[in-house]
Image: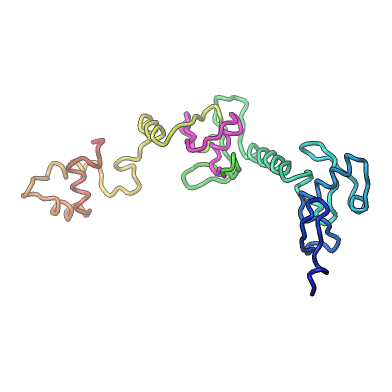
Amino acid sequence: MALSKITSVCPVCSTPFYRKSHPEQRFCSRRCSSFFNREAISKGVKNACAAKRRPPVKCRICKQSFYRPLNLANAFKGTCSKQCAVIRNFEIRTKRFWSQVAITANPDKCWLWVGKSVTKGYGTFHLLIEGKKESRAPRVSYYLFYKIAPKELQALHRCDTPLCCNPHHLFLGTHQENMLDRTNKGRNQDGEKSPNSKLTIEQVLKIRELYVPKQYTSYRLAKEFNTCQQNIIDIIHRKCWKHI
């Protein structure tokens, strides 16, 4: 088939393009189509292209009138351009986020997340914030309330409740500050609290008591307590189990 039968020239930007999506397509992109229709409305001109479309509607964001193409009836969700569609989508996602938070009248109480959560107990919600996709519900809550993007910082809880999304209970901090806050509040998973722990406090104290260099060696203790030799060495030199 000859190219002259399947190509057309956009009347806005004069760019040649292939007519694939619709046999009566006149523009190379939605941007050119929206620009052409806005110009027609501003001039009060109802050309042949505009007459084939639905009656003009107002954009939900900028309130400008525009024509919706017949082949793109749901394009941009009732908005005139992609920029307005991004704003509209952000408003919809914001309402959906707060609908999954159990907001109480008392701001001092926790606002628990009732939506989907991850294994560590934190709520998960995807929202695009300044070009970065956030997935933790507390971080999204902090941004929506304070209008400050967390970026590389973490959202810390004053209430120590992972599911809490009350922005009054949240503050930003680095990873080191988060670990220090956890230590000060006694929430470290040290010793027997750790899910990877194989020894008890009594066994650790017994290991340190029995160890005698070149007599009761770390290899012998490892065999006796059913653990590896490196673990015994770390216990003796207090590289682990430092809290006892």
Picture coordinates of residue 144, whole percent (x, y): 61, 33
In magenta stretch: residue 155: yes
In magenta stretch: residue 125: no
Q: Is residue 179 above or below residue 49?
A: above
Image label count: 0
The way the protein has been coloured in the rendering is: rainbow
Q: Which of the pair 144/18 is nearer the observer?
A: 18
Q: Which of the pair 13/203 is nearer the observer?
A: 13
Quarter of the picture containing the N terminus is bottom right
Q: Which of the pair 119/50 is nearer the observer?
A: 50
Picture coordinates of residue 145, whole percent (x, y): 60, 30
Determine whether, in the image, residue 182 is placed left or right of residue 204: right
Q: Residue furthest bottom?
A: 1
Determine whether, in the image, residue 93 is placed left or right of residue 165: right
- Residue in the picture at 81% in, 59% down: 9
Picture coordinates of residue 224, whole percent (x, y): 16, 53
**Residue interval drawn in magenta:** 133-162
